[in-house]
Image (tube, coloured by chain):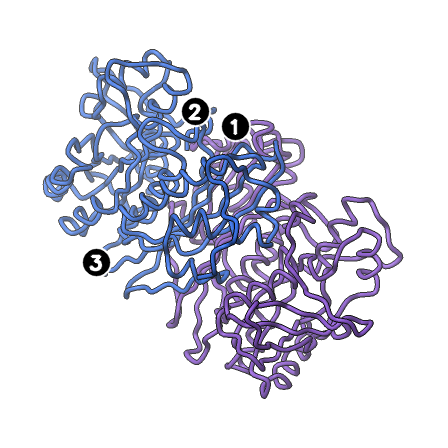
Chain colours: A blue, B purple
Amino acid sequence: MRRPFPHPLNLSRGMVEMSHGAGGRAMIQLIDEIFGAAFQDPTLARGDDQALLSLPAGRVVMTTDGYVITPRVFPGGDIGSLAVHGTVNDVAMSGAVPLYLSAGFILEEGLPLADLDAIARSMAAAARAAGVSVVTGDTKVVERGGCDGVFITTTGVGVITDDRLDIAGDRARPGDAILVSGTLGDHGVAVMSQRENLAFETPILSDSAALNGLVADMVAAVPGIRAMRDPTRGGLAATLNELAHQSGVGMAIREADVPLKPAVRGACELLGLDPLTVPNEGKLVAICPPEHADALLRAMRSHPLGQEAAVIGRVVENAEHFVQMETLLGGRRIVDWLAGEQLPRIC
Amino acid sequence: MRRPFPHPLNLSRGMVEMSHGAGGRAMIQLIDEIFGAAFQDPTLARGDDQALLSLPAGRVVMTTDGYVITPRVFPGGDIGSLAVHGTVNDVAMSGAVPLYLSAGFILEEGLPLADLDAIARSMAAAARAAGVSVVTGDTKVVERGGCDGVFITTTGVGVITDDRLDIAGDRARPGDAILVSGTLGDHGVAVMSQRENLAFETPILSDSAALNGLVADMVAAVPGIRAMRDPTRGGLAATLNELAHQSGVGMAIREADVPLKPAVRGACELLGLDPLTVPNEGKLVAICPPEHADALLRAMRSHPLGQEAAVIGRVVENAEHFVQMETLLGGRRIVDWLAGEQLPRIC
């Protein structure tokens, strides 16, 4: 650890300056007093440009995601916690145990240091809760107007320690059961409500959460899970279509079985959103052989983040790889992915 | 691999749209037709949100860096090749063999698809030349004015396969030799000359290059290298000060031994820059015990990227951790790191 600087940053009134990205003393101070203080990681504190990872035996997995959400603070989370949860979840969807994160920050000149400090502390708290360490990072500063406040790119590394697991988007087979871990659309509706200044009787919170604990219980109960994915941008509709295309199958789901909070349903009607295309940040879709569906559902419902898990349909043969839904009224419709942009900068 | 889309992107006249970041069909098409086509990586082409890495035995290393350089294309490189070289080099500085990269893109609505395609191809060519694979990525799109064109964050993973290596910033010891791999300041001067519209008789090119081949030769020749770092932002001055602070030592260098191209020296005088604080993107600083300095220098000079390598000074005891330089005129001065910002958005 470097020695403290004689004049600490003014975290209540200071702002990000171009010098904080210049590679000199000011950048080192920003890294020490904001990121070092928040993450408290011995590898990070060494000050090298790279981190040595200690990994258990198994298959190593890597994933990356950028976060540009606006507003930066939303009901149920902020860009910092989201940047941890989103990347932890992408690692976990392979069945891997997420272990390490890197964090790359792009900051706008003039960003209040208090905001950056709050984001770093939120990231650190989310990482601790998820059992992962932020071991290396980078900070760039662009001039006023060069970016919108703060963008974060986190990369996650994890290890699949159970040899039996083989979870991938191309493994869904006709007859398999399709499960979701809980109510859909909470994240997108929470952020959009904030943007539109909507107030509801029951406040809608983002579901932003790290799913690695839930996944650990699921793979322990059913190592034969075929595919898992978190329905983030594009929502359930995009995720099911992606999996259908990757596996060369169709999907048939029942609207009545898709868990939705009444408040989210109402807000979607008000905002003109289809809940199936609204992003989630703490939910997953799992596909497994039909004979394991009950065991998987039980494992999911036994975990705090899976209490409202449900079987929502099954994989079918379909040459067009369509996702079809039996509607509440008993009709059928194709669940297509979004053609355009419905919810910009939602993650 | 997914089936081709019926109407391919217009790579000569199309532009990035908000829908390209929305998680739906348009995003998949952008990823397939630009990134998939450029990187040609089977792992990437699977379309999963995470990549399985195949790693040799050894210590695993991770590093991350964001790239916001302007202009995006500069003499000797572009933001794409730079985003590969910079991260490959940060991995290599630990003595690791760089193997895998992730790439996170933040794109501005309206960016010409032709520009993005050129960047992706440049990244892919740089990755192939460096022997690394881009195995996973992410694309976000922000509205016009939300960012400046394109920002890239690359994360690198590599493995230290030689058990004998122990290279870190805190291992420099008094008496050690300080070497650089070639001329300093080329990258910063090339970019600044482009920004200032300066023309020189001999065009100055960025030194942007992947150093993992050079490092492989160096650690084979001298496994006892103590520290290595690439003097990027803040230049040689920042790197030596960082290493001095980490190791709790001082440094003494001789200006006459610091390799500088005459054109770079002239441009620095014209632009009012100190070449010691100007960034490099294809050079490294190495510190080794004095008895190995000759062998290390020979190994460096035998590699195409180290032909102008030089011993520039030595590590000394110094309670203040100062970096001191014997000037060309025989005087002495402290080489401090930059207090402010000299070269914004240089990488």
**Callout 3–callout 1 Cβ contact below 8 Å:** no
Q: Position of residue B148 (x, y in %)?
A: 62, 35
Where residue A42 appears, as percent x and y from the top left, is 37, 60
Q: Which residue appears at 26% of the width and 46% of the height?
A: A129
Q: Secondary structure at mark 2?
A: loop
Q: Residue furthest right?
A: B201
Tell me the subunit letter for badge 1. Answer: B
Residue that label 1 marks: B18
Residue underneath mark 3: A164
Q: Can residue B106 be seen?
A: yes
Farthest-out residue, bottom? B291
Which callout, 3 or 2, points at the residue further toward the start of the chain? 3
* Same-chain check, marks 3 and 1: no
Residue marked by disc 2: A343
Closer-to-camera residue (A17/A6)? A6
In three-dimensional space, the C-alpha distance between marks 2 and 1, rounded to whole angstroms, equals: 9 Å
Q: Is residue A329 left or right of residue A322?
A: left
